[in-house]
Amino acid sequence: MTLNEVNEETRSRMALALDVDDLVEAGRLGRRLFPWFSVAKVGLELFAASGPEAVGTFIDQGYQVFLDLKLHDIPNTVGKTARVLGSLGVSYVTVHSSGGIDMLKAAVDGLNEGATAAGLTPPMVLGVSVLTSEKSATPEKLQERISNVVAADCGGIVCAASDLLLVTEQAPELLSVVPGIRPEGVSNNDQGRPATPSTAIQEGAGLLVIGRAVTASADLEQAANAIALEVSDAL
C-alpha cells in the first residue's frame, strides 16, 4: 500500500479523533487525512468550542461524524438532549453505560425521534463501558455495562482492546469501538490500556479511534498511512 492508496475496508475501520479546540485547525486536519479515515470524531473540546457547526463541517467534508459527548444525566435530560443531537446528521453518539438501562434507552429513543423528525437516519448509540484512562476494569463491572448496552438496544460499545474478548463473548452483535490506539514506539499519553492497531483488529475491534498517534505526528500523512497499512495487514 503506497501513500493515498487505502482500500475502503481499511478506511471504514478508522476514525479520526479531532481533539482540538479550534474548528479551523480541525477542518484542516480533516481535509488532509480524509484519504485514510471514514469517520471524524468530534469530542467535548471541539463541540464546546464550535457546537453543531463542527458536525456540519465534517459532514460536508464527506465524513461520518462520531459525536463523542459521553452523555450522562437523568433519563429525561439525556432523552431531550439526544433528540436535539439526532437532528444534526451524526452517525454515532456516545453515552455512559454506567448511567443504567433507562438512561441509555432514553438516548436511543431521543436520537431516533430527532433524526426521524429531520428526515435523517438515526445515529447509533455507543455505550461507553469503562474509560481507557483507567488502568483496569473488573470483569463484573464490564459484564454489567455490556448488559446495560444490550438491554437498551444500543448498537455499539466503546471499550479498550483488552476488553474485546469479553465483549465478543457476551454481545458479538455490538459494534466494538476501540480508542487508545498506539502503534509501537508511540507514547501512551494518558491511555491506561492502549493497544496497537493490529492487536485491536485481531481481537475483534470494529472501529479504531486514532488521534494523537497521527495528529501529533511530524508527518501526518505518513503516520496515517503506516497505521492504515497495519490495519490492512491485520484484516
Image (cartoon, rainbow, N blue to C red):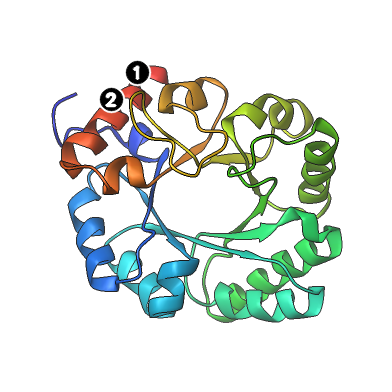
Q: How many marks?
A: 2
Q: Which mark is residue 233?
A: 1
Q: Nearer the viewer, residue 4 or 46?
A: 46
Q: Nearer the viewer, residue 211 or 57?
A: 211
Q: Is mark 2 in CB contact (under 8 Å) with mark 1?
A: yes
Callout 2: 10 Å neighbours few (<14), some, many (20+)? some
Q: Residue 214: image x %, image y %?
A: 29, 42
- Please, what secondary structure does the residue beneath circle 2 have? helix
* 42 relative to 126, above or below: below
Callout 1: 10 Å neighbours few (<14), some, many (20+)? few
- Please, what secondary structure does the residue beneath circle 1 have? helix
Q: Is residue 163 left or right of residue 198?
A: right
Q: Please give the name of the residue rendered at 22% of the width and 33% of the height, measured from the top-left corner.
A: 225
Dividing the picture into quadrants, the one containing residue 124 is bottom right
Give the distance between the C-alpha atoms of the residues marked 2 and 1, in whole angstroms: 6 Å
Quarter of the picture containing the C terminus is top left
Quarter of the picture containing the N terminus is top left
Q: Please give the name of the residue rendered at 69% of the width and 36% of the height, measured from the top-left corner.
A: 173
Q: Is residue 83 left or right of residue 10?
A: right
Q: Amino acid at mark 1?
A: Asp
* 84 relative to 29, above or below: below
Where is mark 2, residue-wise?
229
Q: Residue 44: image x %, image y %?
A: 50, 67
Dividing the picture into quadrants, the one containing residue 23 is bottom left
Q: Please give the name of the residue rendered at 37% of the width and 47% of the height, measured from the top-left corner.
A: 211
Q: Amino acid at mark 2?
A: Leu
Q: Which mark is residue 167?
A: none
Q: Nearer the viewer, residue 110 or 69?
A: 69
Q: Residue 40: image x %, image y %?
A: 38, 56
Q: Please give the name of the residue rendered at 84% of the width and 50% of the height, measured from the top-left corner.
A: 151
Q: Residue 3: image x %, image y %?
A: 13, 32
